[in-house]
């Protein structure tokens, strides 16, 4: 691949010099404030440095809506350029060494070549994602009326084989999980037989489950609507949980924040799935109305904090088998995708660190005493603590940028990519 521009460590260090002093000042001030409640800021820096969230390969290109997609400049045109961009995000925020691939969008000619290319960028592969919500040019049978739940066994077999192929590709890339989201459902009453459709889903997923290597996990991703607008087969956490139980111990539920009706209490769903031992992972994003796939923490930051409050409570409570996979799943229609992914990764780490600030001894005390106001105040105390200096210090100590967006913009990365990657009309790499 021709010589290409990348942001070098010394440029990051040089940019950090501009903000080191004020971040240290803010950091020391916060350290004194936390000391008053016997919290050692160094523990929180270590907590932030250890946090990991995977980025979606499909998130580094500009996304769109059914109305339009307004391509940005220097868009990645293939999986190597997508990884190059993921490498740049990792270089600046240091919490995103894993990339989640989508097949066939990212199907490699050589898994060895791709694995080595990723490793050179310090990257590895997180959960694989299958795609039976679109028809591919060479595809024999259409998924127009469904895939794993389609009435026609031949179409279900085609979808099952595709998922098994994803697992095979993932196995040689070093992935250890496979996410199945299907858009199967109906647009009109009577279009689908609800019970038969679910039976067909379980029968199909049973065959995919059999193809899983022993040390893999299968993630079931529910969604309440879209692309089907009347009924969706895997529409909520309840049916997802039932299916995970039916399939076996390697099957878990994946919670995409945008896949719930407005005002659904997602943090309580998370607590349930933790208690039932089937919380597999997350697709973090945010939304105001539907599955808007907006930047994590951009619309409902308190909800993101409350979700991490449940996760950290389980982590500190050493809940057996608790090991959720954290991933972003977003579509960037009006921002530079790399800036959005860097901001979102940082907002997820922010919620995680704030959740570690919750005084859990006091919280359980006031819960036992039915003191709702003090319970809320205890959570708000943590949520309203500005942990920005901790996040910046954690990035800097991990060799990243104190201010990733400022460093990225100062580098002119996007301008360089615009020169290196003349846009190819018709090639879309974001979600449309
Ligand atoms: C479905 C979804 C799923 C992906 C797709 C790109 O809405 O969240 O996780 O496969 O977006
Ligand atoms: Mn998702």
Image (cartoon, rainbow, N blue to C red):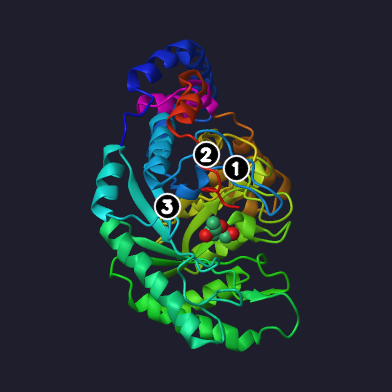
User: x%, y% of residue 142?
Assistant: 54, 75
Q: Which mark is residue 341?
A: 2
Per the image, label 1 sits on a secondary structure element best described as: loop
Q: Determine crowd level at label 2: few under 14, some 14-19, many 20+ residues with C-alpha closer than 10 A.
A: many
Per the image, label 3 sits on a secondary structure element best described as: strand
* Residue that numbered label 3 is attached to: 100
Q: Is residue 185 magenta?
A: no
Occupied quadrant, residue 3 = top left
Earlier sequence position, callout 3 versus callout 1: 3
Distance (Cα) linking label 3 and label 2:
13 Å
Q: Is residue 393 magenta?
A: yes
Q: Determine crowd level at label 1: few under 14, some 14-19, many 20+ residues with C-alpha closer than 10 A.
A: many
Occupied quadrant, residue 233 = bottom right
User: x%, y% of residue 266?
Assistant: 63, 58
Range shown magenta: 388-408
Tag nearer the camera, 2 or 1:
1
Per the image, label 2 sits on a secondary structure element best described as: helix
The answer to whether any part of residue 96 appears in the image is: no
User: x%, y% of residue 245?
Assistant: 47, 77
Earlier sequence position, callout 3 versus callout 2: 3
Q: Looking at the figure, which quarter contains the N terminus?
A: top left
Would the CB of label 2 be found within 8 Å of ligand 1?
A: no
User: In the figure, 269 relative to 79: above or below?
Assistant: below
Residue at the image point whose x is 64% and y is 33% from the top: 384
* Residue that numbered label 1 is attached to: 332
Residue at the image point whose x is 43% and y is 24% from the top: 401
Residue contact at pointers 2 and 1, CB within 8 angstroms: yes
Distance (Cα) linking label 3 and label 1:
16 Å
């Amino acid at each position: 691949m021709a010589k290409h521009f990348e942001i070098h460590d010394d440029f990051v260090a040089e940019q950090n010099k501009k903000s080191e002093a004020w971040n240290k000042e803010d950091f020391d001030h916060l350290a004194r404030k936390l000391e008053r409640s016997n919290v050692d800021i160094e523990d929180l820096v270590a907590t932030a440095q250890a946090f990991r969230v995977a980025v979606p390969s499909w998130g580094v290109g500009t996304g769109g809506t059914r109305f339009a997609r307004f391509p940005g400049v220097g868009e990645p045109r293939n999986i190597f350029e997508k990884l190059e961009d993921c490498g740049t995000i990792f270089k600046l925020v240091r919490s995103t060494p894993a990339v989640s691939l989508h097949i066939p969008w990212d199907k490699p000619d050589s898994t060895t070549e791709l694995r080595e290319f990723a490793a050179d960028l310090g990257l590895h592969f997180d959960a694989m994602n299958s795609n039976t919500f679109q028809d591919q040019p060479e595809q024999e049978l259409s998924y127009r009326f469904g895939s794993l739940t389609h009435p026609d066994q031949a179409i279900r077999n085609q979808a099952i084989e595709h998922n098994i192929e994803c697992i095979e590709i993932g196995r040689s890339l070093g992935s250890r999980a496979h996410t199945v989201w299907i858009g199967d459902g109906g647009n009109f009453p009577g279009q689908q037989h609800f019970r038969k459709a679910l039976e067909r889903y379980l029968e199909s997923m049973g065959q995919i489950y059999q193809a899983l290597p022993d040390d893999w996990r299968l993630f079931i991703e529910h969604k309440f609507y879209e692309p089907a607008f009347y009924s969706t087969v895997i529409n909520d956490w309840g049916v997802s949980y039932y299916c995970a139980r039916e399939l076996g111990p390697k099957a878990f539920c994946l919670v995409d924040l945008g896949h719930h009706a407005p005002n659904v209490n997602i943090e309580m769903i998370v607590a349930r799935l933790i208690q039932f031992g089937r919380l597999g992972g997350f697709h973090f994003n945010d939304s105001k109305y539907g599955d808007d796939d907006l930047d994590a923490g951009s619309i409902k930051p308190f909800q993101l904090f409350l979700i991490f409050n449940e996760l950290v409570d389980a982590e500190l409570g050493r809940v057996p088998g608790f090991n959720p996979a954290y991933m972003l799943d977003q579509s960037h229609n009006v921002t530079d995708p790399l800036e959005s992914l860097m901001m979102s990764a940082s907002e997820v780490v922010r919620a995680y660190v704030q959740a570690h600030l919750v005084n859990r001894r006091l919280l359980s005390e006031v819960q036992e005493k039915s003191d709702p106001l003090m319970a809320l105040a205890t959570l708000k105390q943590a949520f309203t603590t500005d942990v920005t200096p901790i996040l910046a210090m954690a990035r800097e100590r991990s060799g990243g940028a104190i201010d990733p967006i400022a460093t990225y913009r100062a580098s002119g990365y996007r301008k360089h990519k615009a020169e290196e990657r003349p846009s190819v009309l018709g090639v879309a790499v974001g979600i449309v």
